[in-house]
Image (spheres, helix red, strand yellow):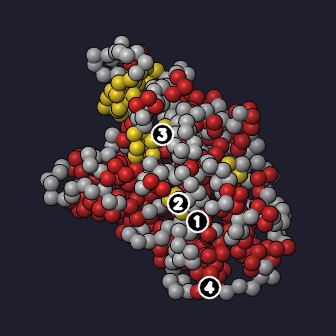
Amino acid sequence: MKKIFAFFTIVLLLTNCKKSDLQLDDPNSPTPTGSLASVKGVEQFALGIWNKLYVGNNLLVHSMNMHSFMGDEQWCSAGNFGWRYVNQVDKITLPAPYNNVVPAVLGIAQPQQLKDLNNLAATNGSQINALVYEWNLGYFVNGQANFLLQAIENPAITMSANKKNTLKAWAYWWKGFAYSRIGSMYVAGVINDKTDGSTSPEYKTRQQIITEANANFDKAIALLTPIAASDAEYASTLNAIIPAFNRPVPNVVITPQMWVRGINTYKARNLLVNKKVTELTATDLSSIKTLAASGLVQGDITFLLGISAVAAEGLSPNNQQHTMLWNSFANNPGWMWPSERWVQDFKDGDQRFVKGVSALPASSVEVNRSSRGIQFGGRYFFTAIQNGGFWSSNARTGFQNFAGSWEENALMLAEVEIRNNQVEAGLAYIDQVRSANGAGLAATVGTSLTQAQALEELRRERRIALTLRGLAFYDARRWGITAKASAGGGRANANVVVPNSLIGKTPAGSWTLLPTFMEYNYLDYWDVPVTEFSYNAPASGSPAIAN
């Protein structure tokens, strides 16, 4: 965040999301005026928070794509936005009798690569500094939420208590979301509640940022808890601040109680994903269980990112800019594919694989795409939802979960139970998710699984049930998979499409699927981007802002 936020030019996203309607006063003014001096104006300003997800690009989608790549859920060899660099694995060791060690094509590991690209030229010129996108997402959203909280308190505006509390809860929820993203991805961050265009040079640790996220979530809970599910003022307000393309069922809104449960799920996530599994204490597990026990349940409505039918009227202005559009094999071939390591986590007969994944023609199997690394290869593409799939779209329809789901909540409860050696109780949650998702798999309860076997069921189920929900990297990080091999990291028996030319097999132009050892060696948490510290040098006493 620069000292004066050039990016705070507010562009509002109205119900019909027409670009001609997306103008308001310059919010660099400490006191919002004009259209912000009316209830309708404040509602439109609240709706405009969605537009902060799209500044130049859909920052939320870019961030979720990068998490998917680093979590080895999808792979992408394209250098745009720095994507090829974030999933640049350190080395791949082929099995016997080959035993070849295949190093990263660029000769350096991901941590150094990302550091080398954290400069202004790679940010403003080639736009391949991957570190800036999620940071910008968090602080663009936080900045708009700050202005919204100020506008709500304008004494010239008269609104009912429930409308006011709903709008304030909206602002605090987005602040909680923003700080959650920052604290879960960067080594340090800034806490900023200002509306005068300035920021603070006093950086905070990632743990302090997560504490701030949860504090904002708690403020939202306090405001929502007294509101009845049937409150008409609440419903009309939510309909005004969530665009129609983000609501699967018109005029059906998240109730205050569902919203609170969603916050509890997110708070449980904040604790779970920011601890290595070896660091989880009994107290941690108890806290996660308490939160998840009051979290999302099957049937709850959650916040979703949809796709507007008219490209110019939403947050996906082309056949990209949405997680389900970027990976469309029909419309965007060449960008991203399902990872072979993700594919191998499906159990035999899983109907989610049968319906959700399609095989590439034999002549079109991707092998070391663009000669950028043998991890960039695969035999499959995502089946579009129009053809019965789940994770890709060939048309302007589809919804992306980005802020928690009942499946995530159930699988957190499963993990707590299994880690507490209540294996059968934990497996029951896994079976519930698989049944609800139509996996068609036999129940695990009653099969006498050990704790270790149950944890493997959990790991695999999180990989599949939570696909493209922004959790793949968090999980790979906390399970230690993305660490150096010398620190116990890496993945054994990781399937890779290996060019026959590497192993002396024929035909030389073909390939062989081999179970390799893949060493990722990724950063756990990213450095603060150059766009922040170049204009906001850390004050004395600030924590380290880089690894």
Residue drawn at 35 percent across, 60 percent down: 437
Secondary structure beneath label 4: helix
Whether 501 is drawn above or below 174: the answer is above
Task: Name the residue that disc number 2 marks.
Answer: 399
If you read the primary sequence from the N terminus, does the residue marked by circle 3 or circle 4 appear first?
Answer: 4
- In this image, 20 relative to 483: left or right? right
Q: Nearer the viewer, residue 351 or 226?
A: 351
Q: Nearer the viewer, residue 415 or 81?
A: 81
- In this image, 33 relative to 81: left or right? right
Task: Name the residue that disc number 4 marks.
Answer: 233
If you read the primary sequence from the N terminus, does the residue marked by circle 2 or circle 3 appear first?
Answer: 3
Within the image, what quadrant is residue 52 found in?
Answer: bottom right
Residue 87: % across, % down: 51, 34
Tag 2: residue type? Phe
Secondary structure beneath label 1: helix
- In this image, 81 relative to 87: left or right? right
